[in-house]
Amino acid sequence: MRLFPFALFMLYAVPALAQPPVTVTTQNAAVDALTPADIDFYHSASPKWLFTIDLRTQQASVEVTMTIRLDLSLGNGDVIPEAVYLTTYPFAVAPARTFTNLDLANSPLVNEYRIKNDIKEKYAEDLRSSQVLPAGTYTVHVEVFPTGQNTSQTSAFAFVLTNPTAIELVAPLDGDQMVNRFPLFQWRFDGTRSRINVYERLPGQGSLEESASGVPHLRFEATTNSYQYPSAGVRALEPGTSYVWYVEGLARTAGNTSASLRSELRSFTVAGEGATTMQTYLDELERALGPKYTHLFDQIRAERLNPTGTLRINGVAISSVDLLRLIGQFRNDPVAVLNVTIE
């Protein structure tokens, strides 16, 4: 009798991973500033949309309770856990249930609600002056407890408040008569989004405000505090023509709305054909040297420094042509710059 080898296969029952009774997902607004009323979810008289909580189950119906907790980590180092705390009575998810912060205002579903007085008392002076909450990270934790289960499902999201408050123009300087056709606009803003507006100053317009009330020559939304006027794709700046410009700092607030902070108005004139401007030197040199020397160029513009007639590098007098040639060398073949001295 011939024996044939055989393989013995054993089948194992692999248990399927149990699906949670309910899943939790969240979506929140992108905001830079909030008021005390925005986070007083239960008492807010005119709430604006801040977040949505979506609950879903694969079962016919699941009974759950929900807890919402707001923790604060402020820019000054203060930490306030459970600054706002809310729990609900049991309710059914069958097979889905959606809540927004709007649904929580005076809701009969709310079982327990409290907001710490630290927010209103400790920062009372700040709130009186600005009506916005202190800058920092405001983290919302959502936890859902199915009835009869010893586990919960959670989700979290955060509002990072910057509360932008000031905007200041840096360059071109106000009244500069020798700006090149492709200037580098610069400003200071403590927010994340801003919008630059440039207007042509037409004959007969007596004020900067009148010039800035018409149709913009250019409008651009930026996520940095500078804008290089492009050489194509927009209306060109014309030699000998004057322009008015300002910047709006954009702050996102609750309800998917935006508030803007407007800078002062400034004017400048584009230099005539063939003229090499001080702004040209600064713009080209700053781009060549890179961000390491940004503070130095900010100082030059802020103090309105201008050449006395003699340009020097390492103590040696050079012409404007030499300077532009050196700048070109920096840009085409970067070299180590050990130091820069203003004379």
Image (cartoon, rainbow, N blue to C red):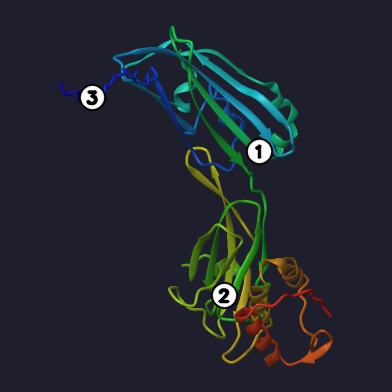
Q: Nearer the viewer, residue 45 or 196?
A: 196
Q: Position of residue 275 (x, y in %)?
A: 62, 90
Nearer-N-terminus badge (2/3): 3
Q: Name the N-terminal-most of marks 1 and 2.
A: 1
**Is 229 positioned to the left or the right of 319 in the image?**
left
Q: Is residue 73 left or right of residue 28?
A: right
x%, y% of residue 69? 57, 23
Q: Compare residues 153 and 309 and report the one nearer the observer.
A: 153
SS type, badge 3: loop
Q: Quadrant of the N terminus?
A: top left
Q: Residue at x 19, y 23 (%)?
A: 3
Classify residue 177 by image quadrant: bottom right
Q: Is residue 132 visible?
A: no
Label 3 vs 1, first from the N-terminus: 3
Q: Which residue is nearer to you in this view: 84 or 316?
A: 316
At which x and y percent is residue 202?
52, 77
Query: Which residue in the protein does label 1 denote?
Result: 136
Q: Residue at x 29, y 14 (%)?
A: 60
Q: Quadrant of the C terminus?
A: bottom right
